[in-house]
Amino acid sequence: MRQPVHDILVGEDYASKWGFSSPEEYYFRAPKKGLSHELVEMMSKMKKEPEWMREFRHKALDTFWAKPMPTWGNQEALGKIDFDDIYYYIKPVEQMGQTWDDVPEDIKRTFDRLGIPEAERKFLSGVSAQYESETVYHSIRDEISKLGVIFLGMDSGLMEHEDIVKRFFGTLIPPTDNKFAALNSAVWSGGSFIYVPPGVRVDIPLQAYFRINAKNMGQFERTLIIADKGARVHYIEGCTAPVYSSSSLHSAVVELIALEDAYIRYTTIQNWSNNIYNLVTKRAIAYKNATVEWVDGNIGSMLTMKYPCVVLAGENARGEILSVAFGGTSQHQDAGAKVFHMAPRTSSTITSKSISKGGGRTTYRGWVKTAPNAEDVRVSVKCDALILDPASRSDTYPTMEIGNPKVRVEHEASVSKLSDDQLFYLMSRGLSENESRVLIVNGFIEQFVKELPMEYAVELNRLIEMEMEGSVG
Amino acid sequence: MNVPTPPLELAQEPEELKNIRRKAWNVYTQAPFPDRASTLWRFSSPEAFWIIPENISSMLERGKITYKLEAPNGLLLSDLQQAVSDESVPVGALVGPEFGKFEALNLALWERGAYLRIPERAKIDQPVVLRKHVSGEGLVLDRSLIHVAREASLTIVEVLEGELTGNGNGYLNAVKEVLVEEGAALTLVEIDLTRGTTRAFVTARHSIGSNAELKWVLARFGEGVLKANLGACLSGQGAKSEISGAVFGFGQGKSDIHTFHDHVEKRTFSNIVLRVVLQDRARSAYTGLIRIGTNASYSEAFQENQNLLLSGDVRAESIPELEILTDEVQCKHGVTVGPVEEELLFYLMSRGVPREDAVRLLVAGFLEPVLGHIPGDFREPLDGRVAHSIKPATEVENVL
């Protein structure tokens, strides 16, 4: 019945192993597809939200309508989004589970199919599983809540800690930031809310799984993580989605706030099915001596547009963005990184690895900016791309704007195919061509994989192997 | 809509060219302004180069350009105007009416230009020197067409001098089209020695045939404003293009350089080295695109932009872009931005070199990889400008 991780065999049909879906049973569905002020009003009422949030949503909806679509990026794919053909809010039958036993069977099945072993679950400090639009399961190990750490679904976070949410919500990514941030602000539901009090160090990564599981359903989760002075937290979000025939839209907003001396690492591996638009706005702010790290893996989806951003607002703040993108057939991974150095002695590192295969397309789009007063800044950007066949494509669009002479910026990018020498070397030692390719590709992304917790590293390597199936030729 | 009639009608021109001019005039007057969101116009405002059609005649009267060719025997610089009436010359083949709004202005109204055609298999050892001199305060249109026929080879040194004064409305609008045919080799050295705050809008397109080679060296040292769009299309197998540029901006100088290497055919090679030194309130923006098309396997492309920032209020922007549409390629680019290495300064100073001279030495060393390609006689004024203009001892550094 349950499938332990090591039983997932490489080479079996991807769809039957990972692309499953549970029957759709909902007691509530938004009455109709599409967006309206009535929908927003109803969502807000259902969630019993405070007045300011209700107004925030309505305002955001107007902003969404007023804002034009981006004029850059993959215009063809963007043009196909039909905003009127999407369910914006669906609440699953199941209510918030108290313990793992309370979680309904078919949701558990979903997690079983993902291959999280029982033993590992106990280790996971908190599993906040987003099933459809609402957090259905949420558990936090006692020690963490004893430390005063708040780890809740965004909806519950708003209910229980309105003061903190009100102070930070939407401050880093206001609805006016871009069209998709506005959309999210209007119809957000779910996501995680984390607050780590001053000086508290959370040693075990906090995790959440997100899934999209209903046809044509947009998922608009909203995550807000605040690490107070001197606090430390690592948040992990993993996504796998069942295969569907019609397009879905995923548009999340993630805000990270690292106050003085704090440390936040945010790790994502996304493996949306190949018909999903993944248009995400992620931004972090690091105050004096704080560090923010984005570790970002993009596999799957039809079009991903995601540029994790760090605003280095205080002296000595540090930002790091490490990302991997895999663009397979009919996929476009338009990912990148943004860093704004607003204070002296800040530093940042961007490392991007991308692989395109089977006519897929990967794009690195980056922006590094230093303010005139930002002295003694160091920036290092490195982008490597691997193209596996003649039909695939790789683009690099980095932007560097330097406003102070005491800044050191280094940018490097390279694009190449798999090296014949390396292939020959491995094959001469008895590996098949495909095995050799998988090995080289896994070596190419090693720098990224080694930053991941064990189970994610295993999962990612396996996903790459699956994606590489039949790439000979 | 009421379209002002083009202020230029030249009777002796072939009908075809007249049509192109009319089309170009329509583009200039009717086309919308370029999108500021595109990388090409991200760092310069198109409005700055817009002159309302009604004013163009008077602006043209107030700007002047002269051409002078110093060439070995037999080689003639033709007036482009003369050339188009005598033979079929492909004006507008690479930068046509649809190319851009301001390029269209040039195509519609250019009157004087330089035309150089190097016959097949001609090997010219001595550099051909073309001197251009601008003056006045209006609009100057400069158009050149260089046609290097099969297997010919030569070096052209182009020196731009003079000054455009006035309230800053006028500018030099230069368009260059260069055809390098199969197996030919062209070394093109362009030295900009304009004075003052002369503004220039420069567009150049090269077409490089199979096994042909272009070496293009650019140097621009000054306080002027430059908006350049420089491109080469590697349209034949085995074509090769190398661009080296040195920019030294001071005062209120501004340079916005875009390069485009378009690899269309197999086994093509391109390399760009752009070195920029900035001081005072100078600005530099470099945007460069390398595209390797689906048909251009086994190609190699490299791109390097290094910026040396000397003092307080400078700004440097860099956007090196890659679009790779096939797999059998080698492509790399790199950007660095930074101040003069304190360690290197310390090394020189510990050997008794005064700080100012040490900075000069380091700047000269930084620019050498580009300036090294420029024949000796032409280097002197450039070296002189570097030595003269460097003001290494700013207040910040004096504290040290």
Image (cartoon, coloured by chain):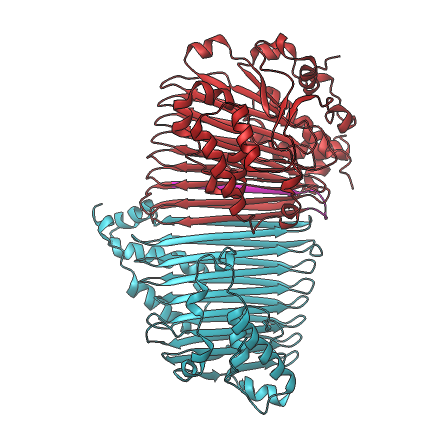
Chain colours: A red, B cyan
Residue B276 in percent (x, y) is at 41, 57
Looking at the image, is A172 positioned above or below residue B84?
A: above
Specify whether residue A72 is painted magenta. no
Residue A227 visible, this orientation:
no
Residue A210 located left or right of residue A11: left
Viewer-proximal residue among B351 and A277:
A277
Residue found at x 29% / y 65% = B388
Residue A467 located left or right of residue B375: right
Viewer-proximal residue among A194 and B85:
A194
Residue B210 located left or right of residue B316: right
Residue found at x 33% / y 46% = A406
Quadrant of the snapshot with the C terminus of chain B: top left
Specify whether residue A379 is painted magenta. yes
Q: How many marks?
A: 0
Q: Which segment did they paint magenta?
A: A378-392
Residue found at x 37% / y 72% = B198
Viewer-proximal residue among B258 and A420:
B258
Quadrant of the snapshot with the N terminus of chain B: bottom right
Q: Quadrant of residue A134?
A: top right
Q: Main secondary structure of the magenta part?
A: strand
Residue A214 in percent (x, y) is at 69, 28
Residue B307 in percent (x, y) is at 41, 53
Residue B192 visible, this orientation:
yes
Q: Quadrant of residue B390?
A: bottom left
